[in-house]
Image (tube, rainbow, N blue to C red):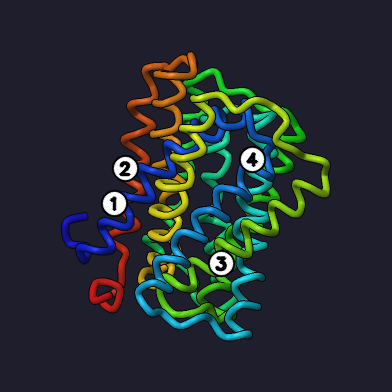
Amino acid sequence: MRALPRYILLALLTVYLVWGSTYFAIHVALQSFPPFLLMGSRFLVAGGLLFAWLKWRGTPNPSRLQWRDAGIVGMLLLGGGMGLTAVGQQYVSSGMTAVFIACSPMVMSLCAGIFGVWPNKREWLGILTGFCGALLLSGSAELSAQPLGMIALLGAIICWDLGSVLSQKKLHLAPGAMGFASEMLLGGAFLCVIGFAKGENFNTPITLPAFFAWSYLVVAGSLLAFTAYMYLLSKVRPALASSYAYVNPVIAVALGVIFGGETLAPRAMLAMAIILLSVLLITLARKPEDAAS
């Protein structure tokens, strides 16, 4: 990992650590926030803050075409990916959510392959190794899931991975952070519209733990980790950018054990070792041009 360029390594660590913890934060926030308004408000606020900061620095507005493409990507990544994840987490434990999403690198690799970017042999080995490690980890805790939650998570994975690939291969966002800000603004607004259309509201009193969890999702989960993820998509191959899906279960299950009362079996250590091996394989599979990014 030390061989990676500094900013790519920093972005990877941010996505690994922060998104691994957001599964638990979403569970806490859902005690007071309805699912779509939870996700919509976090991205709307995060996008608004980033947009205001960029305008203060004199960054030009996105063009009409860039706003359109940001809306498409935002609806897929945030509306479908994050929104359906919030729905699924009402019926699936935090650890199981992360484990189920471990198939995301395979789906993303297939989506990228449609545009001619297929994983090489070592990347496929890393992808399959990580998936096996995530499956092993799923058996090391009492993780629960209902069919409706699993269907929602499947839809979330497809929307997220398709949006990720389209954002780099087909659609044109505004350069740099302005593209991320416009995407979060429109995606967050789309989620809020869905929430209000479904009859969601903020009538439930917002507890202090739920508010802190929501704030963490805005600052760490959206402003930091989501921006880091979009940066990775523009700099590295899909297999490495999506490797967070294998590391996140380790963080999510650990937090579930510490704060959520879930149990952890000894074989979790073996699963973690397998997951780390998969990340190593994917990292070493970089082509020369990736190392120069």
Give the number of the disc on residue 280: 1
Q: Is label 1 in contact with label 3 (beta carbons under 8 Å)?
A: no
Label total for image? 4
Residue hosting label 4: 86
Q: Is label 2 in contact with label 1 (beta carbons under 8 Å)?
A: yes
Residue at 34%, 29% (x, y): give it: 270
The residue lying toward the viewer, choosing from 48 and 266, is: 48
Residues packed near mark 3 inside 10 Å, few (<14), some (14 to 19) or many (20 plus): many
Distance from disc 3 to disc 2, alpha carbons, whole Å, reads: 31 Å
Task: Please state the horizontal and vertical placement of residue 249, each as a whole percent of the image.
Answer: 45, 36
From the image, state whether disc 1 or disc 3 is nearer to you: 3
Circle 2: residue type: Leu
Q: Secondary structure at mark 3?
A: helix
Q: Is residue 135 visible?
A: no
Residue hosting label 3: 183
Q: Secondary structure at mark 1?
A: helix
Disc on the earlier residue, 1 or 4: 4
Query: Is 80 on the left or on the right of 113, as rendered?
Result: right
Disc on the earlier residue, 3 or 4: 4
The residue lying toward the viewer, choosing from 239 and 11, is: 11
Q: Is label 1 in contact with label 4 (beta carbons under 8 Å)?
A: no
Residue at 39%, 22% (x, y): give it: 267
From the image, state whether disc 1 or disc 4 is nearer to you: 4
Circle 1: residue type: Leu
Distance from disc 2 to disc 1, alpha carbons, whole Å, reads: 6 Å
